[in-house]
Amino acid sequence: METRNEKGAAIEHYAPTPAEQGSLPAEEVTAAHGSPKITGTEDNGSGEPIVTTADELEASQTGRFAYVKSQDFVIVLVLGQVLALCITSTNTFSSLLVAQGTSIPAFQTFFNYVLLNIVYTGFTLYRYGFKGWCRLILKDGWKYIILSFLDVQGNYFTVLAYRYTTILSAQLINFFAIVMVVIISFLFLHVRYHITQIAGILICIGGVGILIASDHITGASSPMNPISKGDQVKGDLFALLGAACYGLSNVTEEFLVSKRPLYEVIGQLGFWGMIWNGAQAGIFDKKSFQTATWNGKVGGYLTGYTLILALFYSLAPLMFRLASAAFFNISLLTGNFWGVCIGVKVFHLHIHWMYPIAFVCIVGGLLVYFVGRKVLGEARKPWLGKNQEKGVAGVGTARRKVVRCDAVV
């Protein structure tokens, strides 16, 4: 099926159903699974239609604050805070589950992968057909197996770290995910960071340093949880491994969603993640599952956790398209602030005076990150070509704006 712009160029080309294939010209009938293509009559010399070029788009608005003043920046900034609130909400539900005597970190995430698989794999099957979906598995399945493995391990080892080390220590080590994203993006995706982007990341990290300092002053390592005890070296290593897995999975997902439809990537992440997570939960959460408390409250908390985490997984790929894995990670740094805001109502906590300062510092870092960026910002991916011809023209991509100047997102 196709969505067309005002000039008749198809924005995204998906495999037609068998019924549709009979009515299409031979040159438009493609395999049930193949790279999303943009088809039309206008050509930029590489087989791709264009309304304008990426350079022309960026030249239309100049200045150091071209992107900061754009609508896309507002969307990215708000989206980042929605994602931070999602993470904070899932942490809140996890704390409520622990308070009820139910600690099943691997198993409770299993339901999220099941829900993602049902929704997005179901839609993928509708789009591609069963044979097309099978071809997808055979051709690109290995990429999604790696992505889902990294994602599941990132979740597992981060949660496991809190059993052995202080949460303060784990929070500090989690910064390694940002370092991993920057290094991998630089080496493998040829991303080149501007001095203001580095400054923005450092300012955001400084804001979290203020949060951690306030926790230390008040004698708490987290607004939600008590200090964990145990083998701290082991816990620190688990936290480091979890952060590394998160960094790798974020960059991998950013690369995949720039080239494939969102529903395909999320569906495959849910499908393979369900298998990885289910096996892991069966091995490591078996005793915890048997001794866990099961009542109406636990059921409600698990439902809330699953729905919010599924929303997070649905919105994160859009952030990877509009911005990057690096901006995604620094946007989540406001999570501690939102955690305290929720904790005031749920856990009767008090906001320390340093928290608002830290929040302003982090948001300031997010602003600095995009100073000097052109109007397309980080949506223009260096690995997709000059006019993003190697990517999909989906929602949130720079390619979409190249073929549709009137596209809002």
Image (tube, helix red, strand yellow):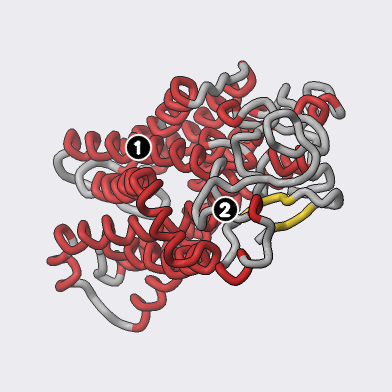
Task: Tell whether label 1 touches label 2 (CB within 8 Å).
Answer: no
Three-letter amino acid code at the position of disc 2: Thr
Disc number for residue 243: 1
Whichever of callouts 2 and 1 sits on the residue coming sooner in the sequence is 2
Three-letter amino acid code at the position of disc 1: Ala
> What residue is at 15 percent from the left and 44 percent from the top?
230
Where does residue 338 sit, x and y in percent of width and height? 54, 52
C-alpha gap between disc 2 and disc 1: 40 Å
Q: Identify the element where label 2 is drawn.
A: loop
- Residues packed near mark 1 inside 10 Å, few (<14), some (14 to 19) or many (20 plus): many
Q: Is residue 111 left or right of residue 338?
A: left
Where does residue 73 sit, x and y in percent of width and height? 72, 40
Outermost top residue? 195
Where does residue 261 sit, x and y in percent of width and height? 56, 51
Using the image as rendered, state which of residue 111 and residue 102 is in the foreground: 111
Q: Is residue 227 left or right of residue 185?
A: left
Location of mark 2 (residue): 30
Q: Identify the element where label 1 is drawn.
A: helix
Quadrant in which residue 51 is drawn:
top right
> What residue is at 45 percent from the left and 24 percent from the top?
188
Residue 189 is at least partly visible in this image: yes
Disc number for residue 262: none
Quadrant in which residue 217 is drawn:
top left
Q: Nearer the viewer, mark 2 or mark 1?
A: 2
> What residue is at 17 percent from the left and 66 percent from the top?
288
